[in-house]
Image (spheres, grey):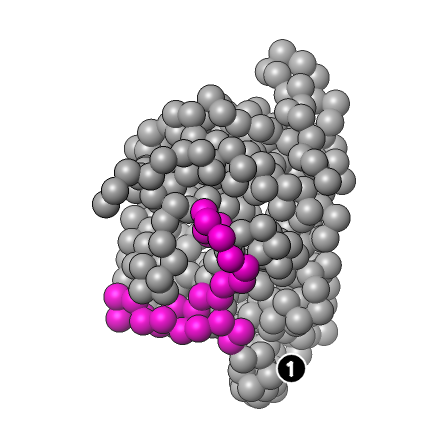
Amino acid sequence: MKIPAPLPLQPDEPDILFEYRENHRFSPGGKRLLTALIPCLTGIGCAYQALAEFRDRRRHLHPGRLVEVDGCRLHVQTAGNGSPAIVLEAGLGGMSSSWGWVQPEAAKFCRVVSYDRAGLGWSEADNAPQTARRDVRRLRDLLRISEIAPPYVLVGHSMGGLFTRVFADQHPDEVVGMVLVDAAHPEQHLRSPAIHRHMRRGFRMLKAIPLLTKLGYVRLTGFFNSWPAGLPPRQHAEAAAFLTSYRHLRSTRDESLAWEEICAEVRETRGLGNMPLAVVTAGKDVLPGHPELQRELAALSSNKVHVAVKGANHVTLVTHRHHALSVVEAIRWVVEAGSARQIRPQ
C-alpha cells in the first residue's frame, strides 16, 4: 500500500472532499439516560463506580513499563526495531491504547513508542501545572531513561499535535519528521466560530465529568462508549475502562483547562523548514474552517504531503483499522523521507 499523492486542497478550490457536520454541538456519543440519575443520587452509583474501578485495575494490567520521571511514574511501551524511533502522542482523553492499530503496524518497519501522559492511562497523576513544555521535558526524559535514542519521528493526534510541535521546536536536532493526525491548530478556537462553539460546549461538559464519574453516571450511561469503538479487543477494553476512570477523566479535564496556555506556547514555535511532514485530515464530520486550518498545518514544512481520509472522522482516524492504515502509511512516508536527514552530535 502506497500513501496517496497530495490531494488538491488549495484555498481557492471547493472542499468537495469533506463531509461537514450539520450539528456543531459536542456529543461523545453515549446514552445519557435520565434513569441513571436515580442510583447516582442515592449513593448506589458511587459504590458501583468504586467496585468497578477496583475490578478494572485488576483486569487491565499495564502492558508496558512504569518509568519514574520527575517524581512521577509514566507508562511507556515499545514495539519493533530500527531507527528513527516513532513516538506517538495521543489526543485529549487518549492514551497508549488509542494506538492499538497504528503501533503494531508501524512496528513492522520501525521502533514505535507509545506512552501515557501524567494522570492518563496507567501513568501516575501529579499536581504540577499543565504546560506543553513540562510534558515535552518529561517525554524527552522518559525516552532517555528508556534508552530510546534520537532521531525521532513525532506523531501527534488531535491535541497531541500541539505537544509534538513544541518538542520539535525545542529539540530540532533530535527530530527528523512529523505526522499530524487531524491535529489541533493553536488558533482554531479563535478563527472558526463553529469550532469555538463546539470546543466551548465540550470543555464545559468536561468540567462536570469528574463529579459525574465519581457518582457512577459516566459508567452507567456509557457516556464515552463510542470513543474506543473499533480498536482491537484488548485495546478497546483498556481504553473503555479508562474512559470511565475518575483519575483519567479528571486529568483529561485538567488538560482541557490548560488549553489556552498550551496553544500560546505553540504559537511561539517556528516552522519546520524542510522537515518531512505528513498531515492526515479526517474527511467526515468536519466543522467549517477545519480544512483551511489543516492546510496551514501542512504549510509548516516545504517537504510535506497532505491527505484527507474519506469516511474517517476525528476519532475513527485512529480507532478504525482501515482508516488507521492511512496514518501508518503517512508514518512510513515520513520515515523514508526523514532517513536521509543528518542528526548533529549532542
Name which residue lies at 57% across and 42% down: 331
Instruction: Examine the rendering and report whether any part of residue 290 can be seen.
Output: yes
Name which residue lies at 49% across and 53% down: 82
**Nearer to the camera, 59 or 216:** 59
Question: From the viewer's perspective, is 36 left or right of 141?
Answer: right
Residue bounds of the magenta highlight: 62-87
> Residue beneath label 1, please?
39
Name which residue lies at 66% across and 38% down: 282
Instruction: Examine the rendering and report whether any part of residue 91 can be seen.
Output: no
Residue 98, quarter of the rendered image: bottom right
Dominant SS in magenta: strand
Q: Position of residue 87 (x, y in %)?
A: 46, 52
How dense is the environment of label 1, judged by Cα within 10 Å: few (below 14), some, or many (20 and up)? some
Q: Residue furthest left?
A: 346
Q: Residue furthest top?
A: 12
Q: Amino acid at mark 1?
A: Pro
Question: From the viewer's perspective, is 247 left or right of 201?
Answer: left
